[in-house]
Image (spheres, grey):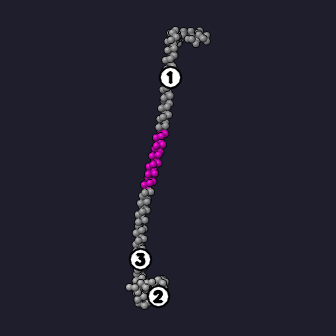
Amino acid sequence: MRECNKSGDQSILEKLKIEKEEIKMAAEIMDELTADEKEYQQYLAREKFLMDEISKKRYAEIKRKELEDKVKEVNEKLMDSNAKLEESETKIKQSEAKIKQSEVKIKQSEEKLKESEEKAKESEEKVVKLIKELLKAGVSHEIISINTGLSNDEINKIKDELEKI
């Protein structure tokens, strides 16, 4: 009502009061409120308080939404991390299984190597025994060397061992 008086639009307001019942009621309420400056100031304060509360609620809703989005993002990252962790654990288990398989194969190879070494030693002992028997029988070094592939020095060593016995 004060604004109408200041700008000179009081006549427009009077016409609207006549035409519309709602405007008439609102104008009467405003007249009552503006009649008492203290009540008017209280009304403005209440109105400001209500607007502030609405703003606070909207701001809180915006912040809540932002936090929900951040929580969702963190949860997604956590799920991705968990998936990667599980994948890594699976790879580790696979690697451990391969290591165990390799260890078994190494053990088997070592056993085969040991068996081969034992067979080679037995064969060598048999060759040495055969050479000793040939030497006892008087077979020449040359014939023994040709048939066994041993050098004269190696044959002489075997002969020396035979003589020590």
Residue at the bottom extreme of this rendering: 138
Residue 127 percent across, percent down from the top left:
42, 82
| Local SS, label 1 | helix
Label 1 Cα neighbours within 10 Å, binned few <14 / some 14-19 / many ≥20:
few
Quadrant holding the N terminus: top right
| Residue kind at label 2, given as amino acid type | His
Read off the residue under disc 1: 52
Write the start and end of the magenta stretch as one range.
Answer: 72-94
Q: Give yes or no for residue 84 being in the magenta stretch.
A: yes
Q: Nearer the viewer, residue 68 or 125?
A: 125
Asked if residue 137 is positioned above or below residue 1 in the image, the reply reads below
| Residue kind at label 1, given as amino acid type | Asp
Q: Earlier in the sequence, mark 2 or mark 3?
A: 3
Read off the residue under disc 2: 141
Read off the residue under disc 3: 121
Residue 109 percent across, percent down from the top left:
42, 68
Q: Nearer the viewer, mark 2 or mark 1?
A: 2
| C-alpha gap between disc 3 and disc 1 | 100 Å
Quadrant holding the C terminus: bottom left
